[in-house]
Image (cartoon, grey):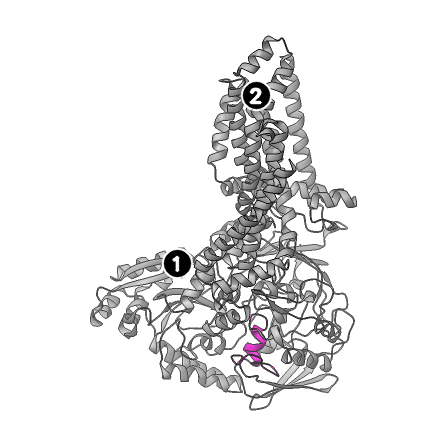
Amino acid sequence: MLRLVVRRLLQLIPTLLGLSVLLFLWLDRLPGGPASAILGERATEAEVARINRALGLDQPIYVQYWRFLKRIFQGDLGTSVQTGQPVTDEFFLRFPATVELSLLAMLIAVAIGIPLGYLAARKRGGWLDVGAVSGSLVGICIPVFFLGLILKEVLAVKLGLFPSYGRLDTGINATDVTGFAVLDGVLTGEFDASWNAIHHLILPAVTLASIPLAVIVRMTRASVLEVQDEDYVRTAQAKGLKQSVVRGRHVLRNALLPVITSVGLLTGSLLSGAVLTESVFSFNGIGNFIKTSIDGRDYPVLVGFIMFIAMVYVLINLLVDVAYSIIDPRVRVH
Amino acid sequence: MRIFKTRAARAITAAVAVGLIATGCASERDSDNESGGKKDTFVFAGAGDPGSLDPALASDGETFRVTRQAFEALLEHESGGTKLVGGLAETWSSNDAGTVWTFNLRKGVKFHDGEAFNAAAVCANYDHWFNWKGTYQSSAVSYYWQTIMGGFAKNEDPETPEANYKSCTAKDENTAVIEVKQPSANLPGGFSLNALAIHSPKAIKEYEKQEATAKGDAITYPKYSQEAGTVAGTGPYKIVKWNKGNKEVTLERFDDYWGEKAKIKNLVFRTIDTEEGRRQALQAGDIDGYDLVAPADVKTLENEGYVVPTRGVFNLFYVGMSQSANPALKKKEVRQAIAQAIDKENLVKTQLPEGGKVADQFMPDTIAGYSKNVTKYPYDPAASKALLKKAGAQNLTIEFCYPTEVTRPYMPAPQDLFELMKADLEKAGIKVRPKAMKWAPDYLDATEAGSCALHMLGWTGDFNDGYNFIGTWFAGFDKQWGFKDKKVFDAVNAGSKMGKAEERTAAYQKANEVIMDYLPGVPISSSPPAIAFGKNVNPPNVSPLTQEVFAEASFK
């Protein structure tokens, strides 16, 4: 197990290096630079040239890349062009928001998706199955931003049940300890702040959960249908084991293996889904910041954030592999 | 059946619980920020985060919207207007040459940190800016200082403009004298910029301990400008918190303010990036007002009872022509044909908010220097066709760039504006090759480099001086336009060095006539960017310069 973890962590190094080269090549191909994004209509050729010179953006791309590598090894990801603050500060300011959002979205997707998929398989052909299958089709097809806009218009604007934007209400007394608004409220005893943060999370999380929920429902259903016809399930039933044991230990446990893998991959993809969701709800997470960074050609933020996300993605997959090997010991043997 | 009932009961209970939680929170939200039954917090949403709490380091409207409430300059614009009036200076005067400016300062003014305002404080500010070094000399940091006063005591980059600022003298406790080397069209208007607002000398001493650095690929702003606590002005509100995680800046009424105190205790600026997000937040009751309302939303909001006051116009929207991108544009007949092909009336009527006006020159009619005698080019497709024939350009094909994913105060819906103009041009027989580009930086870079034959851009004035408009475009060769015409350049620059505002006005009028005779592009319109407030709000006087003072706002 330890060897697996170490091997996977070492694989991170060439992955991140390769990614950084690709990112620089991509950024080099993009038209325009940050200077005119900073100056807007006020940009003149001379002003743009002065800013580019000051920031070293007039240097060849390999010089900029070398400078970037040197900084990385000093633990410095650079400074955001938009905010003038270190990229790492900007990342840790927003990362907790996206983690909270993604976790709640995944919690919703798993808590509803697995039981629903399981029940749909057991009641195959029944109204629950038809409803789950067609509902998941809608969940996959409907664009995230469109769903977000509809939920916001109906539940926040028309009915006033949820806030329409942001992470916390204005005037909420919230002490920032970890950056995780929900957790901070619990740690400091400011439970109203925790609750307020959850209240703000619900609509974006439901929006973000739509695709993973649909995928999990369909995958669980298909997997349970496949497993429940396996010989070992019939054997277990023939042995006279209780139905709850057969379903829990033999059907569900085996059926969940592919679902767990997909949960890992879906968690990674939530980070990209967050770009649209956070934008719709003006939620100050990394997704929203990446969007504004693309608009503003904020290269240091784009490179830093994308590498962070890649690292998170790799780590999530590592966790999935570890979880997989716990659930299915055969993986460890191989 | 029993199981079903139990499950159904559980589901209903869960649904009710979620509903109660949601409504519980909603009612909790409704009672937020109220003391004694009256709301004491005003929440206003802008489209972007401020960049700095020190306005001297900024050049963007979102920063100034916040800092304007906390910092005041020597001169201000009248509430809701464009006329210069006393700010921290009660009166002011200059010598005939316009090089020595004397300010009689307001008495009894205090900074937020308790320091007294006086002539020494004024000079501490101007000398602080003049002596900026290192990264502070980058135009990304000190744009407005360089625009108004040129460079610094010791310029570190040969490209930095030469300093026009000479000195500031505290003649007595309440008289400050600022001297410049040359008369400038930017004065006295520049003294009203929030970027040149006066800070507490004690705060300045703290500022000077901190560096702005250009490390890596960007500029790092000094810490004092990124968190509340150090900055101190004299405005009706003081900045108490900048919560970047929640994208909000909180200000609190300054009880020692010299003028009329703010009517609402707390003022919060929040960022909601999208137009529909801001509208929805207002309709949901989450905010009390927002700026840059989409023109299409104005009527809806008014019908629903929201307050949507109309600002005066102080901007200009134009179609630019780059003669280097398409040589056919070198012929005046072709430029005139394009001007006469565009139905400006229709654009204003259908695309711009109420209060929009057709433009016939490169400055709005609210600016001193506007001329009634410019050559006009009325909409006339037949005349346009005839002009093209005369120029031998009957088969003219022209590239027309327009920006996407952007709303500007002067250009609320670029794509719709483009589509109408394209149809107009085609009606006159001009073939249009559309080129959609992302606003920043692609579009801005392309227009600045002069690679778009036709393009749409505009400008919102900083203060009431014509050079702030025509000097921006036609003071010399600019790739955006791609032409060299000494007559135009000389006419535009004639006014810029005149010390007296009245003399400048006459010079600008003449310049406008010369420009419109040459016709480098097509001025289209001036329009007020819409702003909206909640049903229970008495809004502040709205400003053509988008310089609202929120201390004037109150709840009904």
Residue name at image x 63 percent, y 8 percent: A240
Q: Chain of mark 1?
A: B
* B255 vs B518: above or below: above
- What amino acid is at disc 1? Leu
Say which element carries label 1: helix
User: From what the image shows, is residue B552 above or below residue A113?
Assistant: below
- Please rate how many residues cluster around mark 1, counting C-alpha atoms within 10 Å: few if below 14, some from 14 to 19, many from 20: some
Q: Quadrant of the C terminus of chain A?
A: top right
Check disc 1 and report the residue beneath it: B417
Q: Position of residue B175 (x, y in %)?
A: 70, 85
Stretch in magenta: B140-161
Which residue corresponds to the image point at 63% horizontal and 80% vertical from the top-left?
B130
Of A53 and B512, the residue lying toward us: A53
> Which residue is labeled 2 in the image?
A119
Tell me the quarter of the picture where residue B133 sits.
bottom right
Is B254 magenta? The answer is: no
